[in-house]
Amino acid sequence: MIVEDEGFMVDHNESFDYGGETVEPARGRLARTLDEYIEAHQQIRNKDTHVQLKEDLIEHLWNHHLDLYSYKI
């Protein structure tokens, strides 16, 4: 496969009629290390945690929003 440069140049000073508000990147915590990312991902994907969170959500909805889940015939 041959890829050719079509000569398209990006104009960094290009402006648009309405581009919305300028968004600044968040200035919070530094980026995670790879090990921190992997650990967080494993916690999120943990089957036991997933099941427990799902059950807690169902219980919460039944206890606090029963009207949304009551069927009247």
Image (cartoon, grey):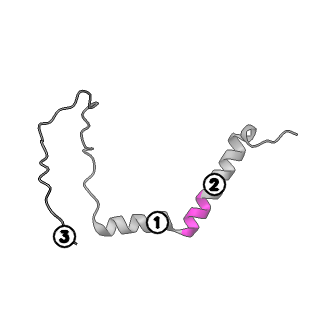
Task: In this rendered view, identify the residue nearer to me: 23 or 43.
Answer: 23
Indicate left or right for 63 with 51 as reference.
Answer: right
Q: Nearer the viewer, mark 3 or mark 1?
A: 3
- Compared with residue 46, is residue 11 higher up or lower down, i.e. above or below? above
Q: Earlier in the sequence, mark 2 or mark 3?
A: 3
> Looking at the image, do the residues carrying marks 2 and 3 touch, with CB atoms under 8 Å apart?
no
Closer to the eye: label 2 or 3: 3
Residue holding disc 3: 2
Callout 1 secondary element: helix
Which residue is at the far right? 73
Q: Would you identify the image quadrant in which residue 4 lies?
A: bottom left
Residue topped by disc 2 = 56
Residue drawn at x 14%, y 36% is 14
Callout 1: few (<14), some (14-19), or many (20+) C-alpha neighbours within 10 Å?
few
Residue 43's label in the rendered image is 1
Label 3, residues with CA under 10 Å away: few <14, some 14-19, many ≥20:
few
The type of residue carrying mark 2 is Asp
